[in-house]
Image (cartoon, helix red, strand yellow):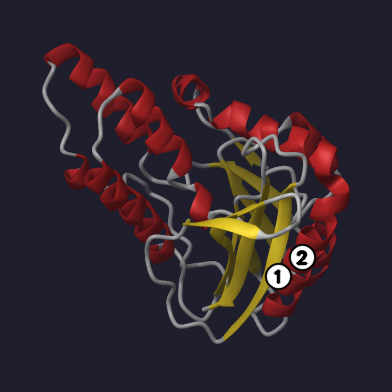
Amino acid sequence: MWMPFDTKEQRIFKKMGYYSDQDGIHQRFAREAENWNEHLTKTKNFIIHACKNKNCQKAAILGSGWLLDVPLIELCEYFKEVWLFDIRHPAWVRHKIRNLKNVHLVECDITCFAVHIYEAIRNRSKNKEAIAWDLLRPVTDLSLDDFDFIVSCNLLDQLDDIPVEYIRNHGRIDEEAEQILRKKIQQSHLRLLPVSKSCIITDMEELLVDSQEQIVHKKKLVYTSIPDPTHNETWIWKFDRQGRYNPHFQTWFAVEAFEI
């Protein structure tokens, strides 16, 4: 089963850059596959470990993307239903899962803010009034309470990036308001995840690395606290060794995985 957005929503997400960002991830993987393999394997192994003590009825993967970091076959063998949630499911993914009868695809704005932000900027262009970004509230009917296992898959730190970048390019936001909005988007996501049934894999810090593989700068990526984990692991993802993401530097991410 595939549940897509309507045409209006698809236009909004395309304008905001969600689809080009998703395509860019696949293109970067094609260039960096050898450097990504360890991260992808660790993500899959963590998910497999986390699901083993859960009821085997329904699993939800938030941020399934290109399925690079999703142990789909193992999940399909363990759970009666596997639901994949993302802003778009590329044709390649729809083709890949065509014979997996227990996999369901849902197109969903996991940020719960994107359309609201788009509409706020569009309305501002008409009435010229300043936008109170701190007053924005999530808009979603997504509920995960009836799932037995939920994965936030390399997603939490990315949720705020495209909305904030869109605001910078088309609206106006000061640094304090930006920090508040980033935190609010991430907190809204964490509130979706039922305790005792969820796991989170996320980049915690962006690391700029020089030619001697020395860390020269760190940037925080998660602006809220993670609920007390029952188990967690950490590793480094060598995201960009070619200096394309941050010119003149390699970009690595400090990744942490949590069962909550």
* Foreground residue among 214 and 112: 214
In-image side of 217 versus 44 (left or right): left
In-image side of 201 versus 138 (left or right): right
The total number of labels drawn is: 2
Q: In which quarter of the image is the N terminus?
A: top right
Q: Is residue 94 visible?
A: no
Identify the disc placed on residue 208: none
Above or below: residue 214 compared with residue 23: below
> Residue at position x 40%, y 56% from top?
186
**Residue picked out by circle 1:** 47
**Residue picked out by circle 2:** 44
Which three-letter amino acid code belongs to the residue tagged 1?
Ile
* Foreground residue among 138 and 38: 38
Tell me whether circle 1 and circle 2 mark residues in contact (CB < 8 Å). yes
Which three-letter amino acid code belongs to the residue tagged 2?
Lys
In-image side of 32 versus 117 (left or right): right
**Residue 133, located in which quarter of the rendered image?**
top left
Residue 205: give x, y in percent of width and height: 54, 60
Above or below: residue 135 compared with residue 193: above
Residue 258: give x, y in percent of width and height: 57, 75
> Residue at position x 57%, y 61% from top?
202
Where disc 1 sits, the SS reads helix
